[in-house]
Amino acid sequence: MNKKTSTVFVCNNCGQDFSKWLGRCTNCGAWDTIVEMRGVKATPSSKAAAAGPAQIVPFSSCTVNETNRIASPYPEIDRVLGGGLIPGAFILLGGDPGIGKSTLLLQLASAWAKTGSKVLYISGEESAEQIYARGSRLGVADSPVLMLTETSVETILNKLDEAAPDIVVIDSIQTMFSDAMESAPGSVSQVRESASLLLRFAKQHKAAVILIGHVTKDGSIAGPRVLEHMVDTVLYFEGDGHYQYRIVRAVKNRYGPSGEIAVMSMTDRGLAEISNPSEFFLLNRANPQVGTAVVPVLEGSRVLVVEVQSLVNKSHFGLPQRVASGINPKKLSLLLAVLERFGGFSLGEYDIFFNIAGGLTVAEPAVDLGVAASIISSFSNRPLRRDLGFIGELGLGGEIRPVNNMPLRIKELAHMGFTQCLAPRPPKKADWTMNNKGIEIIQCGRIGEVKEYIF
């Protein structure tokens, strides 16, 4: 029987289907993103045969055996995954080109294979010789990882049935194509169809499948947004080529908490874990500098102690500059307005430059008090106290507000050897003001009082 071809119009941004072309996607609101796609339309009988017979089971019997998680020699990666790799998990890893996605997964594949798991590494971008050369550089050339260079999903599925691996790595999903679709590899329909077939294999055979995905200019995963909804876990591999560190961040995780991060360092032998990232980001503590403050920020369940730096300089132009790296520039403008209105600092004639040391990007409000303290230090040309940390959100009325997880932040400061912490004055009795891990808590209610405690 001949298969029927279908013509649909698909949004490149979100993957929504339409029966006709539209100038604007009614699902995500993007303009000029709907393209025509031609593919094979499966008959109902073929769909049912592919899906297999469905079974109705009690909800109480749908348990997950946590002891079946596959651990790796990288505890940080296991923590991001929720405790290890679960059989049948469908994972998407995205990141900028050249950031080290293939390097990371080749190291992980080698580590999993050496612990007894059967790992198959499938590449659609490199030859086996190229991958072996990279493995030799990383020191994993002797690992028992199985290799396959193929881009046809149907061929890959046949090989997977033969090999029956425990873990499958696909590098990358944008290079895969299905014979059932007429469009080119990397298109919306091909990415969605290829991922759907691989997802079905992962769930039916209880094999963990990890996809490498490219990202667009705005930093999102390339291809249809529905791809992120299909997978169980979405990991972003973040970092800057100018810096040594890399961050693996879980933005979605059905098997553990989202928001967890693993900090890694890029070396000539591949990626290495950083077990204490606070020491990595905190470099100038021995010699306090003007305009530098120390803040514990929360990334997932982990607290990182980072340095925030400000430079306040007399402006020689008509319009003073406001440059921020590591925080939202609008956040810097807001804090400057609060400092000028309620702190008594006239900053309108000064250029102000802000940076978070190490290239880290922070979005949480707990950094507000540290940013304000670093600006005051640079404006006054006086360094802050050496062992003083800052925790607090700055309100528009000049008040300093408490933030979440205060005990964890204070504990990390104590672990790093800090003796004092400038913190908000709680509205009622709080545990963290008494159980302070040996740190003196200096309570401050308003931004105008800060200058009395920081020098």
Image (cartoon, grey):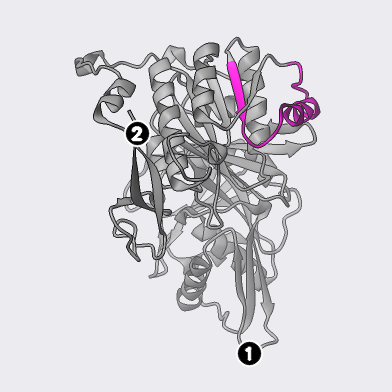
Q: Can residue 438 be seen in this view?
A: no
Q: How crowded is mark 1: few (under 14 residues within 10 Å), some or many (20 or more)?
A: few
Quadrant placement of the C terminus? bottom right
Q: Is residue 62 above or below residue 193?
A: above
Mark 1 vs mark 2: give the one in front.
2
Which residue occupies 54% across, 60% down?
327
Instruction: Give the residue at the far front of this rendering.
Output: 1
60 or 435, which is in the foreground?
Answer: 60
Q: Assess whether residue 128 is covered by the magenta stretch.
A: yes
Which residue occupies 31% across, 15% down?
63
Position of 445 with respect to 115 (left or right) is left
Residue 50: x percent and y percent?
Answer: 33, 23
Tell me the element at label 2: loop
Quadrant placement of the N terminus? top left
Position of 210 with respect to 360 (left or right) is left
Q: Confirm or deny contact between disc 1 and disc 2 (CB under 8 A).
A: no
Residue 7: x percent and y percent?
Answer: 34, 48
Residue kind at label 2, given as amino acid type: Lys
What is the CA distance from the residue labelled 1 to the residue labelled 2? 70 Å
- Disc number placed over residue 318 in the picture, else none: 1
339 or 253, which is in the foreground?
Answer: 253
Residue 194: x percent and y percent?
Answer: 46, 34
The part of the chain drawn in magenta is 119-142
Residue 101: x percent and y percent?
Answer: 63, 38
Which residue occupies 34% across, 64% down?
24
Tell me the element at label 1: loop
Which residue does the numbered mark 2 point to in the structure image?
A: 3
Q: In this view, does 395 lie above or below 14?
A: below
Question: Of the residues under marks 1 and 2, which one precedes in the sequence?
Answer: 2
Q: Assess whether residue 137 is covered by the magenta stretch.
A: yes
302 or 373, which is in the foreground?
Answer: 302
Residue kind at label 1, given as amino acid type: Gly
